[in-house]
Image: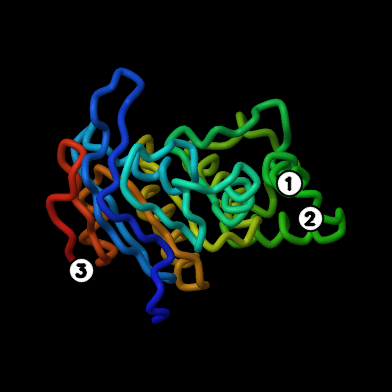
Amino acid sequence: MDPTPLIDMQQVLTRYPSGRIALGGVTLRIHRGEFVFVVGESGAGKSTLLSLLYGALPAASGHLTVAGVDLRTAKSRAVRALRRQCGVIFQDHRLLFRRTVFENIALPLQVQRHPKARMVGRVEAALAFVGLSDAIWSYPDTLSGGEQQRVAIARAMARQPKLILADEPTGNLDYDTALQVTRYLVELQRKGSTVIMATHDLQLLEAFPSRVITLHAGAVVEDRG
């Protein structure tokens, strides 16, 4: 394992717009290639933690480095470059319902100005990975909730990210579908991505033994595995 952590957080504090502390004094190191569950009650700081890691929220104090980028001092260009190395998956998948599955997955690649020939290949490979090749020209509203989340995973992985941040990706799914979705994320970790998955479903922790970070009231209260 590379001794240099992919994520290095030292005494990181951040606040909600109201001024209330969202995370207080969090210290974590996460290495390349890890699969990490982040658990805790609603409001514990799970989403805030993930948002910090791709520069969507600023840290008020402390030290935060992700993939060599110091997010306390980085210019906007460096933060944008970091985001291109990240795949983010949300509970509500955030698909564009007026665009086809192909267009949804290709959009981040278009923003990054990937050549069209490479783009098509990446979209097809991502859809094959999640078992939805036949849905490439479908619209998201014709798919089930689990299939929509699999499209969101395909969208994230098409960028071939170093880091995948999954914020309650199984929160709206039944248990069997949640297992399937998590299995795809575990497979991406096996292919070389670092995966951090926030979840409230403790059954998944039993099905996929991994490192588990527990948050409570904006603080890390347990880090095991």
Viewer-nearest residue: 113 or 53: 53
Residue assigned mark 3? 225
Q: Position of residue 123 (x, y in %)?
A: 72, 54
Q: Nearer the viewer, mark 3 or mark 2?
A: 3
In the image, farthest residue toward the bottom = 1
Does label 3 or label 1 sit earlier along the sequence?
Answer: 1
At a point 30% along the width and 41% down the height, the residue shown is: 46
Q: Position of residue 180 (x, y in %)?
A: 41, 55
Which image quadrant: the N terminus? bottom left
Disc assigned to residue 119: 2
Residue assigned mark 1? 106
Q: Secondary structure at mark 1?
A: helix
Question: Quick check: marks 1 and 2 in contact, CB under 8 Å?
Answer: yes
Q: Amino acid at mark 1?
A: Ala
Q: Position of residue 144 (x, y in %)?
A: 52, 37
In the image, farthest residue toward the left = 221
At a point 36% along the width and 41% down the height, the residue shown is: 168
Q: Is residue 53 left or right of residue 95?
A: left
In the image, farthest residue toward the front = 73
Q: Position of residue 204 (x, y in %)?
A: 27, 54
**Disc 1 to disc 2, C-alpha distance:** 7 Å
